[in-house]
Image (cartoon, grey):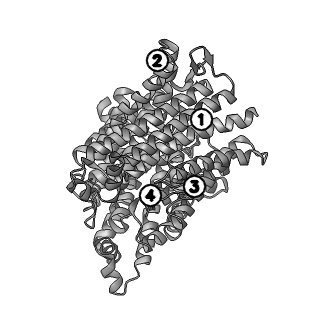
Amino acid sequence: MSYLSYVVVQFEILAMIALALNLIVSCGQLHAGIAGFYGIGALTLALLLKRVDPGFPAVLGAAGLSAAVASLAVSIPSWKFRGEAFVMVSLAAQVCIYSLMYNLTNLTGGPFGVVGIRKPALGGLVFNSSQQLAVLYGVILVIMVIFLLGLLSSSFGRNIKAIRNDELAARSLGIPVRRVKTQVISIASAIVGIAGALYASAASYIDPTLFTLDESILMLSMVIIGGAGNTKGPLVGALVLIGIPEALRFLSLPSSVVGSLRVVIFGLLLIAIIRLRPQGLAGRYRIE
Amino acid sequence: MPNLQVLLNGLVSGAGFALVGAAFAFLLLTTRTLSVSLGALYVLAPYGVLTGLRLGAPLPVSVLGSVTTAALAAIICEVLIHWPLERRNASAEAHLIGSLGAYLAIVQIGVLLWGPDRLVLNGGLPLVYALGGIRITQPQLLGFVCSVTASCVFVATIQRTRLGLGLRALGSNPLLLSTLGRNVQAYRIVAFGAAGALVGLAACLAAYDVGFDPNVGLGAVLIGFASAILGGVSSLWGPIMAGVAIGILRAFVGWMFGTEWVDAGTFTVLALALIGLPRGLSGGIGRGRSLEAEP
């Protein structure tokens, strides 16, 4: 039961990230540096809980806010770049964030990370067990899904879709393209930052190796394999990302082999998807 | 004197980056493709040399074999990923995602075969040559000479031969080339093979100097892409010079702030430079294509 709850918690966190990436893809951008913002959220929660502790909801808000502010490092270049150039800029931002997390040892703990991060607590209730965490994170995930569905069906959401379909035409219709892109990347980064904070609180330990470039690429893979443009696609992508290593676990292979094999399978899936099913397993937008 | 030593170190590593930059720029110029899978070849090439050495082959033979294998691997990526996407007129993002998949799979297959640890090709202390207060090691000298020679031979081949003319025509107007009866896919295969060989050679030379591990690939991709954008691809000398400049920048960042800040410092400066010069120093990235968003 506790193993299943652990897997559910991991899925819920990945689902939040996939939904956030879906929002960015809906705006016509591919963000390949999202793990950096996931790390910023995780680190914000870890440091605030250790030093100030203004309460769990406030810390979650701060984690989202810090990731959203940091996302300006990616969204401002997005005014100038598009296509693969934007992808490379987001990769470069990820390298810089990772480097800062690794080297600012006084603040972040550097390679030793932060240990003893407290579990979520609301009022007097502490969410210690993985079953409790699965319920709490499930509620947060549902709130995020409702928020994103509302966002995408609002006039703001229509602006996002217009930019994706034709940026120039969107501008000619008076849509403030740069502002919308910045807002989309900020909102998505805030969601990813909150997901990072939830991960840190569940795992009780973080270090910079959890937020590497490879993780960013695997996270991006979720919305490509699962698909983008609806809610189902990112959720399927998260399920695949969490399902492959869990399935490999039953093959009794060494953990180092499982880690590499998982990435090999993901790489091959990416190639197969982009060649055979550009809309992903359950998505709506075709990346072609 | 320390400044001159840092400059020399930067020039040596920059000469290697120049090869990587030339490879990325060449592919962008001729095929309009940004192939991240070249980063995987950058990771795998030194393992090829190591395997050759362990089998008893001399170093030059091992390097030649590894560079040839890198060229073949790049061609396989073209045949299996990029050409099918090109035939259905897929977007640049689709090419990028397909090559990202290849990158992930190839690098991790390498990790499964050779392990994740950092390795060296050049055991023992290298020979050191001194000129005044400046020192250069034998691997550095070898790397610099080979990189400069390879860059010159490559640019001369592209600019002065019939094959080079055909490849540039591929970048300029592939439809016309096809209409005139030329085999566009064959030209693309040559372009990918050449880019793979350049990246493989750069990786072998860098590994002979400072060692290698499976995590160097995406860094090489970022540097190669940044060189291509900063230098522009209207002339291959642009990205080559940009690669050298990046090598020097990294050397000075490492000297002033410590080696742990090299990546952050380099990519911050590059991001600022790219924001200021999104079309590169020589402008454009070929065939009416722009990476700039609408103003």
Q: Chain of mark 1?
A: A
Indicate left or right for B166 with A260 as reference: left
| SS label for mark 3 | helix
Q: CA distance from mark 1 to mark 4?
A: 34 Å
Q: Which residue is mark 1?
A: A138
Quadrant of the rendered structure where residue B258 is?
top left
- Please rate how many residues cluster around mark 2, counting C-alpha atoms within 10 Å: few if below 14, some from 14 to 19, many from 20: few
Mark 1 or 3: the one toward you:
1
* Observer able to see residue A201: yes
The mark lying in front, picked from 2 and 3, is: 3
Which residue is drawn at the image coordinates 63% and 44% (left, top)? A242
Q: Is B49 on the left or on the right of B5, as rendered?
A: right
Give residue B112's position: percent from left, percent from top.
66, 50
Foreground of the two, A160 or A100: A160
| C-alpha span from label 2 to label 1 | 34 Å
**Chain identity of mark 4:** B
Q: Earlier in the sequence, mark 2 or mark 3?
A: 2
Name the foreground residue: B55 vs A218.
A218
Determine which residue is flagged by label 3. Answer: A267
Q: Nearer the viewer, mark 2 or mark 4?
A: 4
Please name the residue that numbered disc 4 is placed on. B96
